[in-house]
Image (spheres, rainbow, N blue to C red):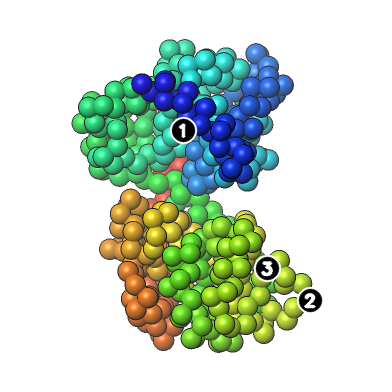
Amino acid sequence: MYNLGIHILSFILKLLTNFNTKIKLGVVGRSKTFSVLERSINTTDKTLWFHCSSLGEYEQGLPVFEVLRKKYPQHKIVLSFFSPSGYEIRKNSKIADVVVYLPLDTKANAKRFLELVHPEFTVFVKYDIWPNLLLELKRRNGRAILISALFRKNQSYFKLYGGKRKTALFAFEHIFVQNENSKALLNSIHYNSVSISGDTRFDRVSNQLLQDNQLDFISEFKDNSTCIVIGSSWPEDETILAPYINKYASKDLKFIIAPHEIKSNHIKSIVSKLNVDTVLFSDKDNKQLSDYSVFVIDTIGLLSKIYSYADIAYVGGAMGQTGLHNILEPATFGVPIIIGKNHSKFPEAYTMIKDAGVTSVKSENELKTALDSFVSSSEYCKSIGHKNSEFIKKSKGAVVQISNYIRI
């Protein structure tokens, strides 16, 4: 049934290429994977294979990838993505010698991919468990680990019908999980080669403090005001934020909106909700940025640095059903954070609401109350933000534990 499903999925994706740009990128990209590998890897090359579903998993795995890059400089690194949102943004990543789309998980594709890559060691990040690939890797006695894994009871691995996917987990010689619950779930299916290492994202975001986060145009815009950064927002987030922005935005209280989706129709939708002085990143040149009270960032790749300018952060995704975005990035800068209500699948959110400086809101009124409390007291704002930075510091260490395990 699984193999039949993969072939049906392949057929459906090809049909959808004329209607969805993202799907088309994936289908076309996957059609080139084997030719790219044939050109780039020789049979005598020693290789490491890193696989990430998308961009978030890449950022999560990057600290481990960087350690292995330095530790094994003679190995070629193959980095694969399943999603275009990962591949298209990181296809020129310096961490890898070859970056490709992962082919669909048919038995034939699995055999050909592994013949070409012949990895000496494989690292999967968080999830994206592909049974045919992993079982073929195990058949070849290949070594593989899964890092920053997070499991939930309702996943197929822990159900009677999840046989093949459950078996695929045993292709990993070791699994590093984020929490005790994930370890207990693995133990319940008699997978015992597991360690609680935590989340490598804590190490990743901590490294951001060592970078140059200066952005002159953001400094000019902020101009000593209190600044609320709205990161990775979706329409549901923007709808409840717009009334507050329209009422309170001024030269003393400014807002930076960095939406998750930067297509022109979404940017126009955001601007249409606002009746205050607003400037776009794409239209910032020759503007006196300090005269504006709202700055909409209609480009990608800047948010992690922009968070360093935040006095307060709102992280999007959890007001709707799309999934909470990365709250650790603003937390590392010691910023109090507000999120939406749908965060149950994100354990870091639950823990940081309880033990650090994250506030969850369900409505426009709750949002106003939370923002007012931070805006009205800079001391309170700093004290809550400090809880977040301390939480990040205490939660580091996964990368050291994982890299100490790996011996090639």
Q: Secondary structure at mark 1?
A: strand
Q: Identity of the amino acid at label 1?
A: Phe
Say which of 315 and 8 sits in front.
Answer: 8
Could you tell which of marks 3 and 1 lies nearer the N-terminus? Answer: 1
Q: Pinpoint residue 15: horizontal percent, then vertical percent.
A: 56, 33
Say which of 80 and 365 sits in front.
Answer: 365
Q: Can the viewer see residue 269?
A: yes
Label 3 crowding class (10 Å Cα cut-off): few <14, some 14-19, many 20+? some
Q: Residue 150, located in which quarter of the rendered image?
A: top left
Q: Identity of the amino acid at label 3?
A: Phe
Q: Residue at x 42, y 73 (%)?
A: 240
Q: Which numbered circle lies on residue 286?
A: 2
Q: Secondary structure at mark 2?
A: loop
Say which of 17 and 191 sits in front.
Answer: 17
Label 2 crowding class (10 Å Cα cut-off): few <14, some 14-19, many 20+? few
The residue at which mark 3 appears reads as: 281
Q: State how far apart marks 3 and 2 are (Cα).
A: 12 Å
Query: In the figure, is residue 394 to the left or right of 163?
Result: right
The residue at which mark 1 appears reads as: 124
Q: State how far apart marks 3 and 1 are (Cα).
A: 36 Å
Label 1 crowding class (10 Å Cα cut-off): few <14, some 14-19, many 20+? many
